[in-house]
Amino acid sequence: MADSSNAPLLQSRSSYGSTDKTSTRHDPIDSEAAGEIQPSRDVEDDVLPETSTIGRNLSWQSAYILVISRVVGSGIFATPGTIVQSVGSAGLSLSLWIVGAFIAACGLAVSLEFGCMLPRSGGDKVYLEFAYRRPRLLASTLFAIKYALFALGVEATDVLSKSLAVGLLTFVCITHSVFPKAGVKIQDVLGWIKIGIIVFMILSGFYVVIFRPDTSTAPLTHQLAWEHLWEETSWNWGVIATSLFKVFYSFAGLDNAANVMNEVKQPVRTLRSVALTALGTACGLYMLVNIAYFLVVPIEEIRGSGELIAALFFERLFGEKFGRVVLPTAVALSSVGNVMVVAFAMARMKQEIARQGFLPYSSLLSSSRPFSSPMGGFIIHYIPSFLVMILPPSDSIYSLILDIDGYAAQLIGLAVAIGLVKLRFQRPDLKRPFKAWMPATA
C-alpha cells in the first residue's frame, strides 16, 4: 500500500496555468513512472514529470528538429570564415572546432543530468531554482531579464530589412499561437530542408575535388595538406579565446528540448537520445562543412572575406549568377527555421516564468487558452523582440546583444554546473537517469 503521506501530492490536479505555491515535500519518485501526474508548483515537485494541457504532442523527430535547428542556424554560413580570419590557418581553425565540440559535450552532460532528474519545461530556470532555493525566484528574475534582451537572429539595417524581420516575427508568433500543430510541422520541414542544404554543400565540395568535373570553376586547393595546414597561424591567446567562444556559441541550443519537456513524449528517454544525436549531427556538419570550404575556397580569400566564405564557396562551385540565388535562399530558410524553433521554446520558457507568479497578469499569461498554445508566452516574446528590431539606430546593436546574450549564457551555464555539484553532495538520494561524468562537469 502506498504511503499515505504521498497521497495529496499524487492526487493533485492543479491546472497548468496555476501559480499556487503550496509547499508539499515528498520522497523521490521515478520520473518516467509518474506518467501524467500534474503535481503542485512546489520546487521539490520538479522531480516529477508534468504534462502540459496542450498534451504531449512532440515526437522524437519534432524534438530532434527543435534542437538541431536551434544549434545549426545561419551562422554556419559565416562563423567558419570569421574564425579563419582571426586565427589565420585552417589547422588551428579545425582544432578549435574539435575543442569546442568537446566542451559542448561536457556542457550537454550537465544539462542531461538535470533534465532527466527534473523532467519539467523551463530548462535552466528549473535547474537553478531547484539547486538554489534562496533568494526565492532568483532564477525566474534572471531569465525574465535575460530574455527581455533577446533578439531575433535577423540583422536590421534599413527599413526594408526591419519590415521583413518584423513580418517574420509576426508570422512565427501567430502561427505557433493560433495554429500550434501546423507550426510544429512547418518547423520540422524547414529543419530537414536546412540539413539537406548543408549536406548538399558538403557533398558538392567533395565531389568537385574528387571527381574534378570539366564544368568546375573551382581550382584545387592544397591548404589541408600538412605542410600548409598551419601556415600564418596566429598564436595570440586572446584571439584564440575569442574564436573558441564563437565556436562554443555555435553549439548553443543542444538543451533546447529541455525547455518544452511537458510536451515531449517519453520525456526522459527522448531528451537523452535527441540531445546526443543532435550533438553528433552538429559536430559532423560543422567539421565537414569547414573541410568543404577549405577544399574549394583558397585560404587567402577566406582571410580577406570573413563572413562571406559561403558566398565564395557557392560562386566557385556554381558560378556567380547561380551562387547568388542559392546562398540567399539557404540563409533565408535556415534563419526562418531557427527563428521558429527559438520562438517555440522561448514562449514555453516565458510561460513557465509567468506560472511562478512573477510577471503581472500571471494567470492570463500562463494560460494555454484559447488555442491550446502558450499565447501569453508568445506575447512576452514578441514585444521585446519587436522593440529591439525597430529601435536601434544602427546594426551595431545586433552584435552587442549577441555578445551580451552569449556571455550571459556562459555565466548561467557555470551556475548550473556548480548547482549540479552542490546537489551531488546535498541530495545524493535523487534519482538520476543520466549521470554526468564529474570531470566533464568541472
Image: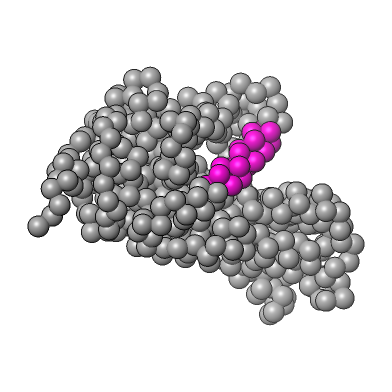
| Of residues 2 and 89, the one drawn nearer to the viewer in this rendering | 2
* Residue farthest along the left direction in this orientation: 1
How is the structure coloured here?
A: one colour
Residue range of the region highlighted in magenta in the rendering: 398-416
Q: Nearer the viewer, residue 404 or 442?
A: 442
Q: Is residue 228 magenta?
A: no
Name the residue rendered at 22%, 54% in the picture. Answer: 35
Q: Split into 4 quadrants, where in the image is the N terminus?
A: bottom left
All told, the count of numbered labels is 0
In the picture, which quadrant includes the C terminus? bottom right
Res 389 → quadrant: top right
Q: In the displayed image of the protein, which residue is found farthest to the right?
A: 232
The spot of residue 320 in percent (x, y) is: 72, 55
Taken as a whole, is the magenta stretch helix, strand or loop? helix
Left or right, 212 with reference to 172: right
**Seen in the image, is 66 located left or right of residue 310?**
left
Can residue 334 be seen?
Answer: no
Magenta stretch containing residue 407, yes or no? yes
Asked if 422 appears above or below 437 in the picture, the reply is above
23 relative to 275, above or below: above
- Residue 282 horizontal/vertical position (percent): 56, 61
- Where residue 250 sits: x, y (%)? 62, 52
Name the residue: 55% across, 62% down: 438
Please tell me in which quadrant of the rendered image residue 209 appears: bottom right
Q: Residue at x 31, y 37 (%)?
A: 42
Please indicate, yes or no, whether residue 259 appears anywhere in the rendered image.
yes
Indicate the quadrant where residue 203 lies: bottom right
The residue positioned 87% from the left and 61% from the top of the image is 233
Q: Position of residue 390 (x, y in %)?
A: 58, 23
